[in-house]
């Protein structure tokens, strides 16, 4: 296609511009198994139009992907989700949502690179899918908090039972959330930032 001088070049929307007051930025990853709400969380809390890489699920995934508990899901993230939120006038968080299906987990290493911290979203109907997720974060040395996404038919457990089931250390925060709600998702991120601050104050954050 030939470009004409009269053609209009469309740049970023005004609301997508980085705030002029921003002085620091941090990379945060939103991780979890398939269908736990990562794309939903990034979309609900992002102050810019989120970038998503969702594709329609096809018969090719039958027998390959574990869709238990997500039978009505028709699309899946194949690379990443991306969003941004200003925590204060000076601090901006860049949010990267990871793909949940195991055949795309090879992308995680790149997404973990340079991350300050992570949110592990879990679905209490499928706790077992969180074990490998947590193990990968621990292997990479990425600090994280646990966010229990509330599903209507999901069983509810006391935090200490979840801690024992997931074999978590006593200092890792566990919070409940509704990934569809901006305020709830923002509270999760604030919990992570407070946790990271406490690690920095004790010299545990590298």
Image (spheres, rainbow, N blue to C red):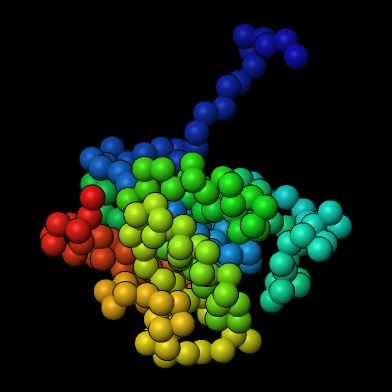
Figure quadrant of residue 159: bottom left
Q: Nearer the viewer, residue 140 or 73?
A: 140
State how many labels appear.
Answer: 0
At 13% from the left and 60% from the top, the residue drawn is 201
Residue 66 location (% of width, % of height): 71, 67
- Up-down: is 12 above or below 9? below
Residue 126 vs residue 194, the one in the foreground: 126
Return the residue found at the far right.
59
Q: Is residue 185 left or right of residue 143?
A: right
Q: Residue at x 14, y 57 (%)?
A: 203
Asked if residue 169 is positioned above or below residue 24 in the image, the reply reads: below
Q: Quadrant of residue 196?
A: bottom left
Relative to residue 28, is residue 32 drawn left or right?
A: right
**Which residue is at 61% across, 59% downward?**
100
Question: Which quadrant of the figure contains the N terminus?
Answer: top right
Q: Position of residue 90 (x, y in %)?
A: 23, 47
From the viewer's perspective, tell me whether residue 132 is left or right of residue 137.
Answer: right
Is residue 118 visible in this depiction of the protein? no
For the question of whether residue 129 can be seen, the reply is: yes
Q: Position of residue 16 (x, y in %)?
A: 45, 41
Task: Give the image location of residue 135, x and y in percent.
Answer: 46, 63
Decide: is 201 above or below 1: below
Choose top left, top right, bottom left or bottom right for residue 194. bottom left
């Amino acid at each position: 296609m030939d470009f004409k001088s009269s053609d209009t070049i469309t740049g970023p929307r005004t609301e997508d511009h980085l705030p002029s007051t921003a002085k620091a930025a941090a990379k945060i990853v939103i991780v979890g198994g398939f269908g736990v709400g990562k794309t939903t969380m990034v979309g609900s809390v992002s102050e810019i139009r989120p970038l998503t890489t969702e594709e329609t699920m096809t018969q090719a995934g039958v027998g390959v992907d574990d869709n238990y508990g997500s039978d009505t899901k028709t699309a899946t993230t194949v690379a990443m989700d991306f969003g941004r939120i200003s925590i204060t006038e000076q601090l901006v968080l860049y949010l990267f949502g990871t793909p949940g299906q195991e055949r795309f987990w090879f992308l995680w290493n790149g997404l973990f690179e340079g991350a300050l911290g992570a949110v592990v979203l879990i679905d209490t109907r499928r706790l077992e899918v969180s074990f490998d997720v947590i193990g990968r974060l621990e292997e990479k040395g990425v600090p994280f908090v646990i966010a229990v996404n509330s599903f209507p038919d999901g069983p509810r457990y006391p935090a200490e039972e979840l801690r024992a089931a997931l074999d978590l250390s006593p200092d890792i925060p566990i919070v409940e959330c509704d990934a569809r709600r901006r305020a709830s998702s923002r509270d999760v991120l604030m919990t992570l930032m407070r946790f990271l601050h406490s690690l920095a104050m004790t010299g545990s954050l590298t």
